Image (cartoon, rainbow, N blue to C red):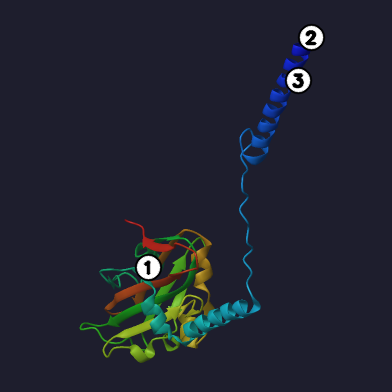
Amino acid sequence: MEKNYIKETISLLIVVAVALFGLWLVYKTTDIGKEPKTKIPEIKESVITEEEIEKQKEEEKQKEEAKKQLSDFQKYQSYNHLSIYPKGLITPSDYIKNPEKVLIRIAETIIVSGRIEDAYIYIKAGVDNPLRELTEHDTLYFYLMDGQYQGGHLDLRQSKLSEFSEIGMTEVLYNFKDIPLATSLENYQAGKIDSFNFLDNLNDREKHYTAGLVSTVRYGEIVEMILAYQCAENSDCEIRLLAQ
């Protein structure tokens, strides 16, 4: 009987050993009982070769050269346009007696959002009725005020648009980075013209006041006064008139 007990015990141990070996084999050859393996994606570094860098530089250079080759008028045409006086502006009859009050009265409020890279001011005007070109006795007055007043009589000789002027009208175009004007009529008549960078002022704050008129003792009219502007790169800019 003792032999049978020993024999049964040995048989049981063999069965247990075989079972344990089977479990071990399953564990080793399958994912049962193991934490799932997370595959870490490979991070491939973007390597830019010197040749690609040079190519990018050349493309940027070509873009800049193309911009320089455009005339001021072509740039003006391609920019966003804002009409300051959509219905034109007749010089008020009390301008000569009260110039400061008139300039304040005719001012329009403009709101600037975003960053402006470049801008132009275009004015089309005339004197008498029917309208004709301004004479040596007439001037165009323009100003931009944003807490700091900048303005005066524009030097018509330095207009960027002389070759495009229509017969019977005076048309002028100036870049906002370089607006030539005389701060007084006396300086204008004496040829004392200074250059002002209005673009810095335009980008300085949001709210501005601007105005223009034909400075004359007779009938004068601004037919069009347009502010053209281009947004800086990656800037969603806008210049708009504040509703009165």
In which quadrant of the rendered image does the N terminus lie? top right
In the rendered image, residue 71, in percent from the top left (x then y), is placed at: 43, 86
Q: Nearer the viewer, residue 106 or 115?
A: 115
* Furthest residue in direction top, as rendered: 1
Mark 3 and mark 2 in contact (Cβ < 8 Å)? no
Secondary structure of the residue carrying numbered label 2: helix
Left or right, residue 23 beside residue 174: right
Sequence order check, earlier mark of 2 and 3: 2
Identify the residue under disc 3: 10
What's under tag 2, amino acid-wise? Glu
Mark 1 and mark 2 in contact (Cβ < 8 Å)? no
Mark 1 and mark 3 in contact (Cβ < 8 Å)? no
Residue 216 seen anywhere in this rendered image of the structure? no
Secondary structure of the residue carrying numbered label 1: loop
Secondary structure of the residue carrying numbered label 3: helix
Judged by depth in the image, the label closer to the viewer, 3 or 1, is 3
* Alpha carbon distance from label 2 to label 1: 135 Å
What's under tag 3, amino acid-wise? Ile
Left or right, residue 131 beside residue 228: left
In the rendered image, residue 29, in percent from the top left (x then y), is placed at: 64, 41
Sequence order check, earlier mark of 3 and 1: 3
The image's mark for residue 2 is 2
* Alpha carbon distance from label 2 to label 3: 12 Å
Judged by depth in the image, the label closer to the viewer, 2 or 3, is 2
In the rendered image, residue 46, in percent from the top left (x then y), is placed at: 62, 66
